[in-house]
Image (spheres, rainbow, N blue to C red):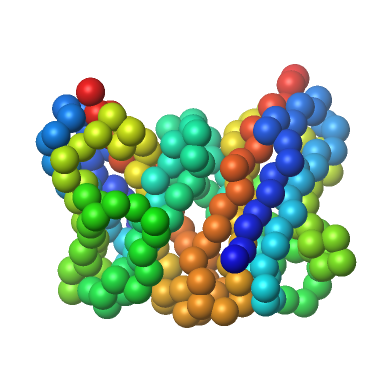
Amino acid sequence: KAGVTQTPRYLIKTRGQQVTLSCSPISGHRSVSWYQQTPGQGLQFLFEYFSETQRNKGNFPGRFSGRQFSNSRSEMNVSTLELGDSALYLCASSETPGLASTDTQYFGPGTRLTVL
Amino acid sequence: AQSVAQPEDQVNVAEGNPLTVKCTYSVSGNPYLFWYVQYPNRGLQFLLKYITGDNLVKGSYGFEAEFNKSQTSFHLKKPSALVSDSALYFCAVRDGGYSTLTFGKGTMLLVSP
C-alpha cells in the first residue's frame, strides 16, 4: 500500500497570508491527525478527523482549522500566518480514531512551512 | 493528564555497541506506548508498540523495547548499533481510554563508526 502523502512538501509564505496543506491517508484508513513540529515545542497535536468529523482538537488558536472529505483526504488551513507558525506539519493516518487506542498512526513526510 | 519524558536530549554510542534510549511515562489508566524514528527531512516512522502482554516488544530494524510498569518506563534498545540508526527517536503514550497520542521531546541518537 502507498503510504501517507502530503502536499506540498515545502512552502514559503509571508506574514498575514493563509495556507492550505493537504494529506492523503493510507488506503482504507479513515482517521487523519495533524501535528505541528517545531524545535522548541516538539510535536504538538492539532486535530483529528474521522468520517468527516473533527473528533479531537489540540490547544491551538482558531486560525488553525481543518476538514476531511468523504474519501478520507484531509486539509488543514492556517489563516493570518505569523512567524511562529513556521514548522513541519505532519499528517498521520490510522484505521480508526482515538477511540481504538491500540491503533498505530502512520505518518507522512510532512510539509515544511516557512513564514517570512 | 498523560505525559512522556525522554530524559536525554542526545545519546552517543559506537557502532557495534548496544544502545538504549530512555522513556518514562505518566497516565491515569493503562498505557499504550509507541516508539517512532525520524530521519532528517522525513516524517515519523513507526518502530514498535506495547499494548499488553509480554513486557519485551520486538519491532522493526532489530529494535526492541522493555515495558516496566513499576518504573513506568519503556526504554528502546538494540543489541548492536549501526551508523544508519543515527536519527531522532520519539516515545509516545496514549491512555487506555479515549485520548490523543502524546509525544516526548525526542532523543537524538548518534552512532559513530
**The furthest residue to the top:** B113
| B55 up-or-down from B29: above or below | above
Which image quadrant: the C terminus of chain B? top right
Q: Is residue B35 visible?
A: no
**The furthest residue to the left:** A17
Q: Quadrant of residue A23?
A: bottom left
Q: Is residue A14 left or right of residue A26?
A: left
Residue at (42, 68) in percent of width and height = A94
Q: Quadrant of residue A9?
A: top left
| B40 up-or-down from B20: above or below | above
Q: How many numbered circles are shown?
A: 0
Q: Position of residue A111 (x, y in %)?
A: 31, 40
Q: Decide which of A37, A15 is in the foreground and name it.
A: A15
Q: Position of residue A107 (x, y in %)?
A: 43, 53
Residue at (14, 34) in percent of width and height = A16
| B53 up-or-down from A42: above or below | below
Residue at (79, 62) in percent of width and height = B72
Which image quadrant: the N terminus of chain B? bottom right
Q: Is residue A112 left or right of residue B39?
A: left
Q: Position of residue A103 (x, y in %)?
A: 52, 72
Q: Is residue A107 left or right of residue A84?
A: right
Q: Quadrant of residue A81?
A: top left
Q: Position of residue A99 (x, y in %)?
A: 47, 79
Residue at (80, 42) in percent of width and height = B20
Q: Is residue B107 visible?
A: yes
